[in-house]
Image (cartoon, grey):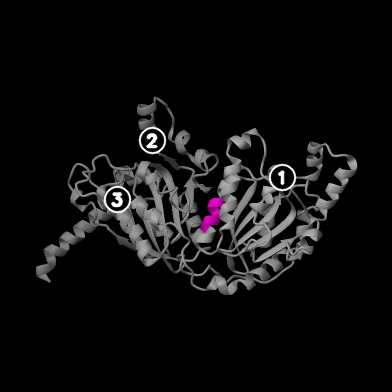
Amino acid sequence: MGNWDAILGELQRKRDFATAMGGPERLDRHRRAGKLNARERAAALFDEGNFVELGAFAGNLSEGGEASAPADGLIAGFGRIDGGPVLAGIEDFTVLAGSIGDAGSAKRYRLAQLARQERVPLVFMLEGAGHRLTNEHSTPAPGDLQALVELSGLVPMVCLVMGPSAGHGALTAPLSDFVVMTEAASLFAAGPPIVKAALGETATKEELGGPAVHVKASGLAHNLVTDDSAAIAMARSYLSYFPRNAWEGSSRTEGPDMQPRMLDGILDLIHPDPRIPFDARVLLRMLADEGAVLEVQPDFGGTLVTALARLGGRSVAIVANNPAVRAGAVDSAAAQKAAHFLEVADAFHLPVIFLADNPGVLPGTASERAGVLRSAARMFTVQHRLRTPKLHVTLRKAFGFGSSIMGMNPFDGQTLTLAFPAISLGAMPAASGAAAAGLGEAARARAIAEQTAGAWAMSDKMVYDAVIDPRELRNALLDGLSLVSARLDRPSEPRPGGVTP
């Protein structure tokens, strides 16, 4: 033992340095800002006591130097979430403002490499200043962003933004499947000092890239939460809807509310008159297993609701028009949101349920300038190429291209196509279309009558597999999922091309 004393003593000293982070003063400042430190974030993410660190000794040669960098400012490792393995990288803002050193860059690449090799999900937590100016680049680190692109669509990738994140580090967000910001977070290509020097523009971190910018305006981030703990809880919840990788079948979870049941309250929620709005979010909570709905991007593209849910314990992706917002007309933001959401669902074999209730794609000068046709075309292309099962329901109305992007085109690979009895279909709403075309009263009345007979006319041609009582909606969808259960449960292959940012 005596021969090892000095060697093991040095090992322990190196371990102590690696875990010291930025020291007591910086850690205390971080805590007073209402934030968890990087190691506390790791502990909160994984099941209790279940974190194994990798690369702790990266940056160990900086000890005693001018720029001390324990763990090179990135806590990395793996553990279990609800019993399943997950990898994580967590920027440590208390060490050189969480900047990315050469060793830290190699560590980021190592995480992506391991996630691909072992086929397990990857979580990043961002709070850092981007590339470190003092990097020597004498031995160029592998391209971690390239590794993330290659990883896309192979394993679920989650990014939590918990403070300011700039430059190279911030690019992790758009390359991930799901991005959560806390109220203290911001994302930007360059921070306020650089923007001031380069453009002469004065802006705060919040004005450049706070939640008001990226959760509500740009759509770069998906969900907003109050603090670190809420962000970590949302990451754990999000991952629970997915398999560990794209080679596994879709996820299924046992729960107390998995059985068929009639939706008795739906007739009070949805009026047969399509001009009377209702909140699609209420319908989703009614439809899904109890407590099993996670809305993705609730503050962006509000004419569509995109949500992860469970039906009979099976994870599903739901895309629903929301008549409470602009009658459910699909605008550019909603179509962009849905296209990305559908690509993620397809990558991990989640069946997609389309609930259509819209008057079409949103018209008008503002909508055209926002590129609504291109965005709607992208959503249409993604839904047409879905390999995962898709189930379509026309609730009350579906007009023009608004029906096509919601998966209503006849014989387009749907597992099940359903309609409520009192639906209206057509190239455009008959009342406004008749006025625009200058039709007389008799022609106008005939057009309206044809539209309102849509369920019977289309089911006569097998465009719809069934016309159902709205109260049967949950049970009908459960029946559809039972039809595809063998396909969903067997091993699969990854989606070509991954997920487009």
| Amino acid, disc 2 | Gly
Q: Is residue 252 above or below residue 265?
A: below
The residue that appears at 41% across and 64% down in the rendered structure is: 120
Is residue 45 rendered magenta in the image?
A: no
Hey, which residue is sitting farthest left in the picture? Answer: 3
Q: Residue 268: x percent and y percent?
A: 79, 55
Hey, which residue is sitting farthest top in the picture? Answer: 200
Between marks 3 and 2 in the image, the one whose residue lies nearer the viewer: 3
- Locate residue 206 relative to residue 432 in the image: left or right: left
Secondary structure of the residue carrying numbered label 2 = loop
**Extent of the magenta region:** 338-344
Of the numbered discs in the image, which one, if any, rests on residue 105? 3
| Amino acid, disc 1 | Ala
Secondary structure of the residue carrying numbered label 1 = helix
Hey, which residue is sitting farthest right in the picture? Answer: 442
Of the numbered discs in the image, which one, if any, rests on residue 191? 2
The residue that appears at 59% across and 47% down in the rendered structure is: 377
Real-space CA distance between mark 1 and mark 3, rounded to the nearest whole angstrom: 47 Å
| Amino acid, disc 3 | Ser
Classify 10 Å Cα crowding around label 1: few (below 14), some (14-19), many (20 and above). Answer: many
- Locate residue 124 relative to residue 447 in the image: left or right: left
Real-space CA distance between mark 1 and mark 2, rounded to the nearest whole angstrom: 39 Å
- Locate residue 143 relative to residue 392 in the image: left or right: left
- Magenta stretch, main secondary structure, is helix
Secondary structure of the residue carrying numbered label 3 = helix
- Locate residue 399 relative to residue 206 in the image: left or right: right
Q: Residue 409: x percent and y percent?
A: 67, 57
Which residue carries the number 1 mark? 327
Of labels 3 and 2, earlier in sequence is: 3
Q: Quadrant of residue 266?
A: bottom right
Q: Quadrant of residue 33?
A: top left
Is residue 341 rendered magenta in the image?
A: yes
